[in-house]
Amino acid sequence: MKVFAGGWVFFVIAGLSAILGANAASAQASLVIDRERVDAGQGWAVGFSEGGSGCIATARYKDGTRVWLGVSARSGRYIAFSNPAWRSIVEGGGYEVRMLAGGSSWRVETEGLLLTDGPTIISRNIKLEVLEDIAHASSFSLELAGRKIFGGELSGSRRALNLAFQCFERNKSEAERIAANRSPTPNSRPNSGPPQMAGNGTGFFVRSDGLILTNEHVTKGCRSIMVGVPGNEFTTAAVKATDAVNDLTLLKIAAGPSAVPSFRTSLKMGEGVAVFGYPLSNYVATAGNFTMGYISAQAGLANDTREYQISAPVQPGNSGGPMIDHMGNVVGIINSKLNALSVALKQGDIPQNINFAIKASVALNFLETNGITLQAPAASKKLEPTELAEHLRSFSVKVDCYK
């Protein structure tokens, strides 16, 4: 959580406090066969990979899944799978998967990587007998979180694996030299380990093609961003545009929402508003939080006319979340709250519910500048609180930042 000092002190509500080695992400992004390429038949190719510090056997299947069977001077024997559709896989994430080959079954720990072939899971230092059983089996399937994500026949994998082992024996000294001398790439962070969740904010869909609006401070400095879509698993988000001055970021995910909101740009002091977000996710309900309040002032901190002051309670994690009027139109984006403790120390009194939201007009200007046109006309029918809560839930998302 950031603290900004000025005439007053206030909190930005982001909630931010926060295969083959520690620096593998960048090196692995170009994991390819560099030399000694052999066509092993049935779709398999084998050869030496400098990025993998060893030899690999690889094949791509009809569903887009790529399989790697390999041996590395850094990680021993390994098996990896990638698919562009696996958007819930985050770099550095840990995933327990179930592998079924013939009549055998194993539960193994895998690590997430982001490679050029798509999100990838890799199991390193795998036992030889497991790798051989997989290669010898007539059928193979992979399950993640109880859901089958890959299945098929690994035809030709036995011969391909044997060729990979032979390749490694021929190139063992070269593989060990590469592994020993591999230096961190410009994009890697030595000894930093895998990305860790640093905090979360909230966002909301603005169009049916997966565009999401949130605060710039929610996504600033993130190595990866994961978005939790209502009723679905988390998926990786890409940053499409940012505006640090107005604290806005536009994200894009592949999944579309069940609903998109309309916008309204003119509010009066005293109008009722409702807020939805994912505050204090380690302490309160993880399904989201709904609060109501009023427009307290037409300007924000230090008379900033880009913001409203509101009385609706908000907490760390609400940042980037939508604020709507009683007809369900988005009228603002939550972004900060007054630091009550700091003010109390200066003034001798504890202020209550002094929070701020970026005006919808500022957000619309940001979207229009980036060529984004909205689809929904402004609503005019007043909704009950229960209807407002359900409406907000339908297009709001949780935004997790990994650093």
Image: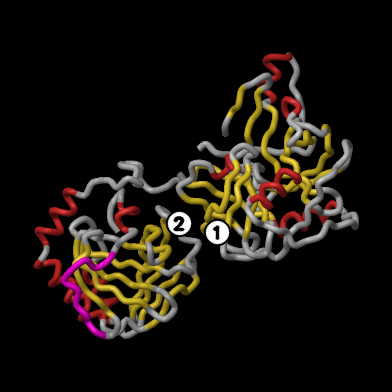
Instruction: Pinpoint residue 363: horizontal percent, then vertical percent.
Output: 70, 46
Q: Which residue is more in the foreground, 347 or 329?
A: 329
Going by the numbered disc 1, the residue's amino acid type is Phe
Q: Where is residue 208 in the image (x, y as percent from the top left)?
A: 67, 64
Q: In this view, does 126 lie to the left or right of 352?
A: left
Q: What residue type is labelled 2?
A: Val
Image quarter in which the N terminus is found: top right
Q: Tell me the residue at 40%/77% (across/down).
A: 141
Indicate which disc, 1 or 2, sits on the residue closer to the N terminus.
Answer: 2
Measure the C-alpha gap from mark 1 to mark 2.
9 Å
Among the 4 quarters of the image, the one containing residue 113: bottom left
Q: What element carries label 1?
A: strand
Q: Residue 234 carries which label?
A: 1
Q: Let me know if residue 27 is in the magenta part.
A: no
Look at the numbered disc 2 and give the secondary structure of its residue: loop
Is 36 one of the magenta-colored residues?
yes
Q: Find residue 339 and name its label.
A: none
Q: Can residue 362 be seen in this view?
A: yes
> What colour scheme has been applied to the protein in the rendered image?
secondary structure
Most frequent secondary structure within the magenta stretch: strand
Residue 143, horizontal then vertical, whole percent? 44, 71
What residue is at 68 percent from the left and 52 percent from the top? 368
Give the number of marks: 2
Q: In which quadrant of the rendered image does the C terminus lie?
A: top left
Q: Mark 2 points at which residue?
A: 90
Q: Given contact means CB atoms under 8 Å apart, are the residues at marks 1 and 2 in contact?
A: yes
Q: Is residue 76 visible?
A: no
* Residue 368 or residue 107, whichever sits in front: 368
Residue density around tag 2, few if under 14, some if 14–19, many if 20 or more, within 10 Å: many
Q: What stretch is highlighted in magenta?
A: 32-41
